Image: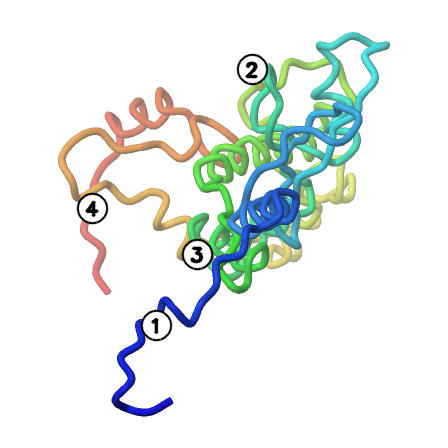
Amino acid sequence: MDEGDNIDDEDLWEDVEEDDEESGAAEEITENAQGSRPSEDDIGNNFVRIVHLNGVHYLPLLYCLCGGEERLHVDLSQARLIPTSFIRIKTLFTCAVLDDYRLSNLEMKASAYQYWQKIVRITSPDGVTQVPDLYRELRRLSREWRWLKKIKWAGFGHENRDPMNPAPGELSIFCLTCLQPGVNLPPDWKADQQRNPEPYIRDMTIDGNFTADHVESKNPGPDLWLSKGGRMMASRVRIEAFMEMAVTRLTVW
């Protein structure tokens, strides 16, 4: 073509009608690539979101109602799936991912936001798929999961006790190394203590986490309690009664 020829670029292209089926398939692929959420499978089973260590998945939920619909959350828990709601179950977290977040927070100080961003990156490494924001669900369910772990360690799953009203000190973990009469001390331990007192001396250790839990907030307003009488934490009523009779002394280093 010579430079002097004045031909519009549109004349070089020919419009071709696209096949309806191919066009529909292309739109479906585009929607899936952008993170469309399937609602049901080919036989009408509803899909639910399941958050696991390897990302967010959509799978059909099939369950038996022979034991009653009110036992559905119990059956899911036995299958190592913890729902975020108990009426209309749409999202579930596996016990493995809740345990992994707890250990990541405990050992690596990873926040819920950082951990959820990791799940998002695992689900969609290229960032094309739109992963639903379940950050708030992770925070709420992680607190419920820690409470379930506490009452499990305290033996509430094997006895007919109300986990919502534990007795003082009932959620604390039994320490096998602490000196306790009738457990790990000889019958004549008092006489032995007179002869050799060093093995019977108790050491109280406070690490950084304990000191951070008990400092007063610098911001105005009431402090937020991490646990109201759970495990090693005293109840607020007992703390206030102790503070009324406590004497503040300056520590000389």
Q: Residue 125: image x %, image y %?
A: 55, 63
| Front-lying residue, 40 or 94 | 40
Q: Amino acid at mark 1?
A: Asp
Q: Amino acid at mark 4?
A: Arg
Sequence order check: which comes first, mark 1 or mark 4? 1
Observer-side mark, 1 or 4, equals 1
Q: Residues within 10 Å of mark 1 (few under 14, many from 20)?
A: few
Q: Which residue is mark 2?
A: 165
Q: Amino acid at mark 3?
A: Asp
| Front-lying residue, 108 or 226 | 108
Q: Residues within 10 Å of mark 4 (few under 14, many from 20)?
A: few
Q: How is the image coloured?
A: rainbow
Observer-side mark, 4 or 3, equals 3
| Front-lying residue, 189 or 238 | 238
Q: Which residue is mark 4?
A: 249
Q: Residue 9 — which label?
A: 1
Sequence order check: which comes first, mark 3 or mark 1? 1
Report the residue that reaches farthest toward the bottom.
2
